[in-house]
Amino acid sequence: MPATDPRQHSAEHILTAVFGQLFSGKLLDTRFKGTKVRCDFAVQSGLPIDEIIKQTEATANAIICQNREVTFEQMTAEEAAQYCSLHRLPEETQDVRLVLIGQDVVTPCSGPHVKNTSEIGRLHIRTWNLVEPGLIRLTFVVV
Ligand SMILES: [Zn+2]
């Protein structure tokens, strides 16, 4: 398996946080396939999908442009649950490494990340479709 690109990984966290903030979104699945990343998001919004994608991409890039430092904090799962959703971790997880990209992008993750969002470049959502009502599948690249 090829190593995950730290730029893609960091961009995925920002995208997930933006979906959460704007559309009560929840990341259900991510696949890293070479230069492309495919994500499934459950969202709650009455807006047309094109509008959701436009707003999400713009907000994610606005965060990337803030040149945020990326930092880490180790804590117990119980503590971490106060800062973010742990729905993608196995239930028996005891210790969690939180990845913080500013105050409002907080993700439990042990993968590779950039040190500063300025390294990411720009996040571009290339394709998207509604798999079913409330479920968006998209692919993005960082350029
Ligand atoms: Zn990560």
Image: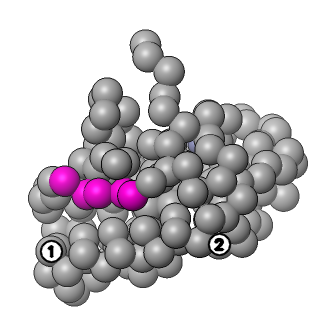
**Placement of the N terminus among the 4 image quadrants:** top left
**Residue 114 falls left or right of residue 76:** left
Element type at mark 1: helix
Seen at 42% across and 76% down, the residue is: 59
Range of the magenta residues?
Answer: 122-126
- Disc 2 marks a residue whose amino acid type is Asp
Seen at 55% across and 49% down, the residue is: 119
Residue 17 disc label: none
Q: Looking at the picture, how far across and down is residue 99, in whole percent?
A: 70, 51
**Beta carbon of the mark 1 residue lies under 8 A of ligand 1:** no
- The residue that mark 2 highlights is 104
Labels 1 and 2: the sequence-earlier one: 1
- The residue that mark 1 highlights is 50
Extreme-bottom residue of the structure: 46
Q: Is residue 34 above or below residue 96?
A: above
Seen at 72% across and 72% down, the residue is: 103
Q: How is the image coloured?
A: one colour
